[in-house]
Amino acid sequence: MAKKTHQLDRIIIQLLQFQGLIRKEAEAQIQSEVYQLNHAEITQVKQHALHFGEGAKERLIENLLEKRREAFFFKVQNQLNNPLFALDARQAPQPAMAM
């Protein structure tokens, strides 16, 4: 992630790591699910910028990203709460102890 990592992104990364992904895989999944805007959203942002200016464009982008970030967070969280995908903390592998 090029910019400062959002707090919710860090939490999502931790949840994805708990599911078994490594950090780079989790970051790539966040990049594709949250930060990659689709064609309709890009068109909406461009039209918004034409009517209201660059400041409004940035606010719209932040709002879009925040909604997508929250939706992805709830999706990942629901996967952990789903009994088919849940990892029980008691069954999670424990780190090996040094002798």
Image (tube, rainbow, N blue to C red):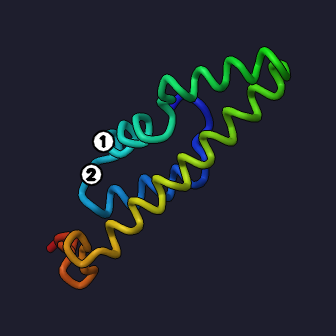
**Which residue is tagged 1?**
25
Residue 48 at x, y = what percent?
A: 75, 24
Left or right of 1: which side holds 53?
Answer: right
Which circle marks residue 54 in the picture? none
Seen in the picture, residue 72 relative to 77 is either above or below; the reply is above
Seen in the picture, residue 84 relative to 66 is either above or below; the reply is below
Left or right of 5: which side holds 55?
Answer: right
Front position in the image: 15 or 59: 59
Quarter occupied by residue 60: top right
**Which residue is tagged 2?**
21
Q: Residues within 10 Å of mark 1 (few under 14, many from 20)?
A: some
Instruction: Give me the residue at 18% from left, 80% from top.
Output: 91
Q: Label 2's element?
A: loop
Residue 5 at x, y = what percent?
A: 58, 42
Instruction: Give me the residue at 42% from left, 52% from top.
Output: 13
Residue 7 at x, y = what percent?
A: 60, 53
